[in-house]
Image: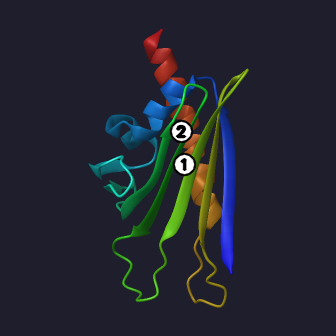
């Protein structure tokens, strides 16, 4: 059984600008976490330090880039999780050009941990991160004016 969380936001940016927000180390540091490693090729390794100090390791699964859409998929996990049953999750970012800018869909999927003693705020993480992404996107636009 799997658990899936999907969130989306429309940014007033182009697909190219939004792709940069997802793949540039300085941009990522502003809303997701500071990359310490970032190899954006299938099989490439990545590591992020979140604002709370959590370190997540990742392996890139899929990278696809076009003028009007893009997709980035990776599997990541909390590097400090001491549980032997710690589960990696799969994250997929899909970017689609719209009349208003770019729609960012993020879906995170993991095995269900129903019955486990630890409750993870699975959806809340993406609510906060997409808010941070939207805020960073707006702040960035005003800085360029």
Residue 129 is tagged as 1
Residue 66 to residue 33: above or below: above
Which residue occupies the extreme right position in the image? 99
In the image, taking residue 50 as reference, residue 116 lies left or right, namely: right
| Nearer-the-camera pick, 93 or 51 | 93
Residue 77 percent across, percent down from the top left:
42, 69
Left or right: where 84 falls relative to 136: left
Q: Are marks 1 and 2 in contact (CB under 8 Å)?
A: yes
Residue at image position (57%, 58%) is 125
Q: Image height check: is 136 above or below 86?
A: above
Q: Residue at x 46, y 87 (%)?
A: 85
Is residue 41 depicted above or below 20 in this figure?
Answer: below
Q: Which residue is mark 2?
A: 133
Q: Quadrant of the N terminus?
A: bottom right
Q: Mark 2 falls on what kind of element?
A: helix
Residue 72 in percent (x, y) is at 50, 47
Q: CA distance from mark 1 to mark 2?
A: 6 Å
- Answer with the quarter of the image where residue 138 lies: top right
Q: Viewed as shown, does residue 96 lie left or right of 72?
A: right
Q: Work out whether residue 116 or residue 69 is closer to the camera in this orientation and state it.
A: 69
- Position of 56 with respect to 140 (left or right) is left
Mark 2 Cα shell of 10 Å, populated few (<14), some (14-19), many (≥20): many
Question: Residue 30: percent from the left, percent from the top?
Answer: 41, 39
Circle 1 Cα neighbour tier, 10 Å, few/some/many (<14 / 14–19 / ≥20): some
Residue at 60% x, 43% y is: 94
Picture coordinates of residue 134, whole percent (x, y): 58, 35
User: What scheme was used to colour the molecule?
Assistant: rainbow
The image shows a total of numbered marks equal to 2
């Amino acid at each position: 059984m799997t658990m899936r969380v999907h969130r989306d936001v429309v940014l007033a940016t182009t697909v190219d600008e939004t792709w940069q927000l997802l793949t540039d180390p300085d941009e990522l540091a502003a809303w997701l976490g500071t990359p310490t490693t970032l190899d954006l090729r299938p099989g490439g390794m990545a590591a992020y330090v979140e604002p709370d100090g959590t370190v997540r390791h990742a392996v890139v699964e899929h990278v696809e880039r076009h003028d009007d859409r893009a997709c980035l998929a990776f599997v990541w996990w909390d590097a400090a999780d001491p549980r032997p049953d710690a589960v990696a999750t799969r994250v997929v970012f899909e970017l689609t050009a719209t009349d208003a800018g770019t729609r960012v869909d993020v879906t995170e999927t993991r095995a269900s941990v129903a019955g486990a003693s630890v409750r993870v705020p699975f959806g809340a993480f993406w609510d906060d991160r997409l808010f941070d992404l939207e805020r960073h996107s707006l702040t960035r636009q005003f800085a360029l004016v």
